[in-house]
Image (cartoon, grey):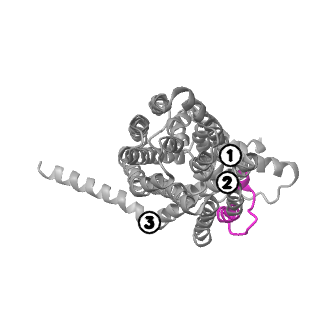
Amino acid sequence: MSEKPQTSHAQTRTNWRRTLVAYTEPRVLQVLALGVSSGLPLLLTYSTLSAWLSTVGVRRAAVGAFALVGTPYALKFVWAPVMDRVPPPLPLGRRRGWGVTVQLLLIGAILCLASCDPKQNLSMMAALALIVAFLSASQDVVIDAWRVESTNADQQAAGAAMIQAGYRIGMLVSGAGCLLIAAYRGWFAAYATMAALVAAGLVVFLLAPEPHVPAEASHAAESGWLAVRRAISRAVIVPFRDFMRRPLWPVILVAIFGYKLGEAMAGVMSTPLYIALGFSLPEIAAASKVFGFFSIVAGVMLGGVVTTRYGILRSLIACGVLQSIGNLFFVLQAVGGHRIGYLALCVTAENITGGMAGTVLITYISSLCSPAFTATATQYALLSSITLLGRTVVGSSGGWLSEKMGWAWFFVLTSVVGLPALCLFPWVARRDDLKLGKPSLDAAEVKSEDPALS
C-alpha cells in the first residue's frame, strides 16, 4: 500500500520534467525566434501607432478608427491558399521561400511608414499602415504553418507557448522599445529600428530546415480543366469542408471570436489611456520594459504548462476568466490616475493573463488544423483570423466608446464582454474532441472529399 503513492509521485515528477524539457528542443526554440519576428510589426499599426497619433494631437475617435488598418489580420485566410499551393518567388521551399519573400517586403513597407508625417498626410499614413498590416498578416500565415508542420503532437503546447513568448517579446520591443526610441530620437528612427529588427527572422528561415509534410499523390498526367479544379479544390474547398465536418463548427467560430474580444478592445486604447492620464512616453516604456518582459515570459510559459497538464478545455475556461480579471486593472488605473505603481500593475496583469489565454487558444486552434493535405496555412489562417475580428471590427470602436462611457466604464465592459464565449466551449466539448482536437479528415479521406474527383 505504501509503494503506490511513491510511484504516483515519481510519474508526476517525470511528467512535469517532460513538460519542461519540451521547451529546450531545437524546433521549439526556432519557433521562439520566429515569434519575435511575427510580433514586431503588430504594434507598429496598433498601440504604438496610436501613441504616435495621440502625441501629435489626432482626435481620440480617429485614433480608435485606425484599428481598422488591422483588417488584413482578420482576412488573411483569403490569400492563405496561395501560400499553401503556389510556389514562392524564392526557391527555398514552400514555407521558407514565402517567409523570406514576405519579410523583405515588410521591411521596406515599415521604412516607408516611418517616413510619414501624420500632421501632413494622415490618409497616406493609413494606406501605408494597411500595407504593413497586410504583409505582417502574410508573415503570420507562413510562420504559423511552419510551426504547426514542424512540431509534433507532444510539442504543440510548448510550440504555442513559444510562439506567444516570441510574439509578445516582439510586441514589447515594438511597444516599449519603440516609444523609448521615439522619445529621444523621433518616430522615424523608432520605426526604422523596428524594420531592422524584423530582419532577424530571415536568419531562421534561411538556416532552419523546411518542414516535412505528408506527400501528396502525384497528378502530373492531368491537364486542362480537371487539373484546375483539383488545384482549387485542394487549396480552398477541401480545407474549409474539412473544418465544417466538425460538430457545432459555427459555435466554435463564435467561441474563438469572443475569447479575446475584451483584451482586443482594451489593447487598442490602453496607450491612449496612459497618455490621457499624463504619463510620458519614457514612463510608459520604462514600466513596460521593467515589468513587461518577465510578465510576458511568465504568462506564456504558465499557459503552456497549464495546457499540457490540465488539457485544453479546463485551461480555456480558467485562463479566460483570468484574462477578464486582468482587464479590471485598467479600471484601477483609470480611477487612480497618474500613479506609476498602478501602471506597473496594469502592464503585469495584462501580460500574464493575456499570455496564458493566448497560449491555450493557439494550442486549441493548432489542434483543429489538418496537415494531412498540406493546407495548414489555410486552416490556421481562417481560425486565427476569427480571433482578430474583435481587434479590427469591434476594437476600432474603442475610441468612440471610451468617449461616450468614460475610461472606467469602458474597461469594465472589456472585462465582461468575452465571458459568454467561455460558456460555449463546454457545449462544444460534448460534441467534439476538444481535449485532443484531432483533425476531422485524415490523408486517406482527402481523395473522397475532393469535389474535383466527383
Residue 285: x and y in percent read 47, 55
Residue 302: x and y in percent read 37, 50
Under circle 3, the secondary element is loop
Residue 365: x and y in percent read 53, 45
Residue 434 part of the magenta segment:
no
Left or right placement of residue 368 versus residue 347 in this view: right
Measure how far apart labels 1 and 2 are at the Cα level: 9 Å
* Numbered badge on residue 72: 1
* Amino acid type at mark 1: Pro
Looking at the image, do the residues carrying marks 1 and 2 touch, with CB atoms under 8 Å apart? yes
Mark closer to the chain start, 2 or 3: 3
Residue 101 part of the magenta segment:
yes
Under circle 2, the secondary element is helix
* Amino acid type at mark 2: Ser
Residue 243, quarter of picture? top right
Magenta span covers which residues?
A: 81-104
| Residue reaching furthest to the left | 2
Q: Mark 3 points at which residue?
A: 25
* Amino acid type at mark 3: Glu
Q: Name the residue under label 2.
A: 138
From the image, which quarter does the C terminus lie in?
top right
